[in-house]
Amino acid sequence: MNIAAHIVVQDAAEAAGWYANAFGARELSRIPLPGTKVMTVELAFGDSVVHVGSEFPDMGIVSPLTIGGTATVLQINTDDADGLWTRAVNAGAEARHQLADSFWGERHGQLGDPFGHRWDIAQRVRDVPHDEIVAAAAQAFGTG
């Protein structure tokens, strides 16, 4: 069993090109529709697959831009967080949380893409014992 994300954007073809440029995603397949619209594009982000579908508001299939945001975050684990971060920002991603070393042992930051989705960029930089992460989380979020 595995999970493959399916995200909705206003224009799947445009988003697929942006994800290739910004994150190095590789197109596996696409389902074009008559005219210029694309139903979905299947992208590989390393070993993971993300399906990027165009929105169809009359069918209730809408993007974060249409509904005013998203609570979902996709995380890209990489061996070069700084390089991927720079590449994505140069492609037009918006820094939501700056890339920095985190208390849980990752170099970590969050970006917003032009299509309304959020992406964490993460690179494991050190191992941190679980009890230390729990204590640091309690302190960081005001409960410790």
Image (cartoon, grey):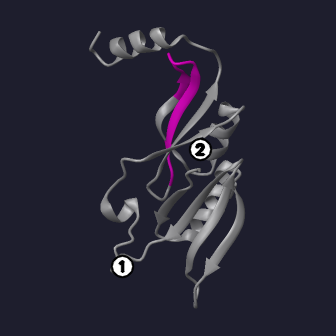
Q: Dividing the picture into quarters, in which one does residue 29 lie?
A: bottom right
**Residue found at x 47% / y 64%:** 8
Prevailing SS of the magenta stretch: strand
Q: Which mark is residue 89?
A: 2
Point out the frontmost of discs 2 and 1. Answer: 1
**Residue found at x 66% / y 31%:** 82
Q: Which residue is mark 1?
A: 59
**Residue found at x 47% / y 8%:** 132
Residue 31, position as x, y percentages in the image: 62, 78
Of 142 and 132, nearer the camera is 132
Distance from disc 2 to disc 1, alpha carbons, whole Å, reads 33 Å
Q: Residues within 10 Å of mark 2 (few under 14, many from 20)?
A: some
Residue 39, position as x, y percentages in the image: 54, 77
Left or right, residue 11 beside residue 13: left
Closer to the chain start, of discs 2 and 1, is 1
Q: Dividing the picture into quarters, in which one does residue 64 lie?
A: bottom left
Quarter of the rendering occupied by the C terminus:
top left
Residue 93, position as x, y percentages in the image: 54, 48
Left or right, residue 10 beside residue 85: left
Q: Amino acid at mark 1?
A: Met
Q: Dividing the picture into quarters, in which one does residue 142 lie?
A: top left
Asked if residue 96 is positioned above or below residue 131 in the image, the reply reads: below
Q: Secondary structure at mark 2?
A: helix
Q: Which mark is residue 3?
A: none
Which residues fall within the magenta stretch? Answer: 99-113
Residue closest to the far front: 1
Q: Secondary structure at mark 1?
A: helix
Asked if residue 75 is positioned above or below residue 132 in the image, the reply reads: below
**Residue found at x 37% / y 52%:** 70
Q: Amino acid at mark 2?
A: Val
Left or right, residue 142 beside residue 103: left
Residue 34, position as x, y percentages in the image: 58, 91
